[in-house]
Image (tube, rainbow, N blue to C red):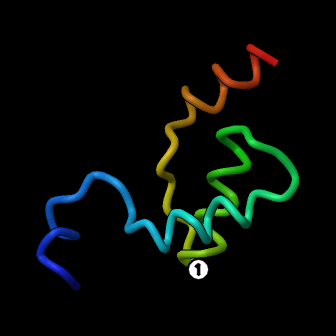
Amino acid sequence: MQIADLSSTHPPISERIKILRGMMHGVGFADYQTAYNKIKNNSEKIIPPSGLKQAENTQ
C-alpha cells in the first residue's frame, strides 16, 4: 500500500476505473455500490441508505 493511499478519501484511480467499468446497467448510486462490492469482493456499504433512498426519489 502506498503512503498516498493511507490518507486518500477515494479509491486509487485504477480501482475507480474498474468500478466504473463494472457499472454496465446504470449510473446511479445503487449501481456504483453494486460495482464497488463486486470489485472489492465484499459487502461494505459506502453509500448510506439515505443516499440510496434520495436517489430513488429523484428518478
Q: Amino acid under label 1?
A: Asn
Q: Where is 38 relative to 2, above or below?
A: above
Counting other residues with Cα less than 10 Å from the Cα at mark 1, is it few (<14), some (14-19), or many (20 or more)? Answer: few
Rendering coords of residue 3 (x, y %): 12, 75
Rendering coords of residue 41 (x, y %): 58, 79
Element assignment for label 1? loop
The total number of labels drawn is 1
Residue found at the far bottom of this picture: 1
The residue lying toward the viewer, choosing from 49 and 15, is 15
Rendering coords of residue 54 (x, y %): 64, 19
User: Which residue is found at the position 56% from the left and 29% from the top?
Assistant: 51
Quadrant occupied by the C terminus: top right
User: Which residue is found at the position 49% from the left and 71% from the top?
Assistant: 15
Taking the image as shown, residue 25 lies to the left or right of residue 4, namely right
Residue found at the far top of this picture: 58
Rendering coords of residue 50 (x, y %): 55, 26
For residue 29, which quarter of the picture?
A: top right
Q: Where is 54 relative to 8, above or below?
A: above
User: Which residue is found at the position 22% from the left and 85% from the top?
Assistant: 1
For residue 28, which quarter of the picture?
A: top right
The residue lying toward the viewer, choosing from 52 and 11, is 11
The residue lying toward the viewer, choosing from 6 and 33, is 6
The residue pinned by badge 1 equals 41
User: Which residue is found at the position 48% from the left and 73% from the top?
Assistant: 14
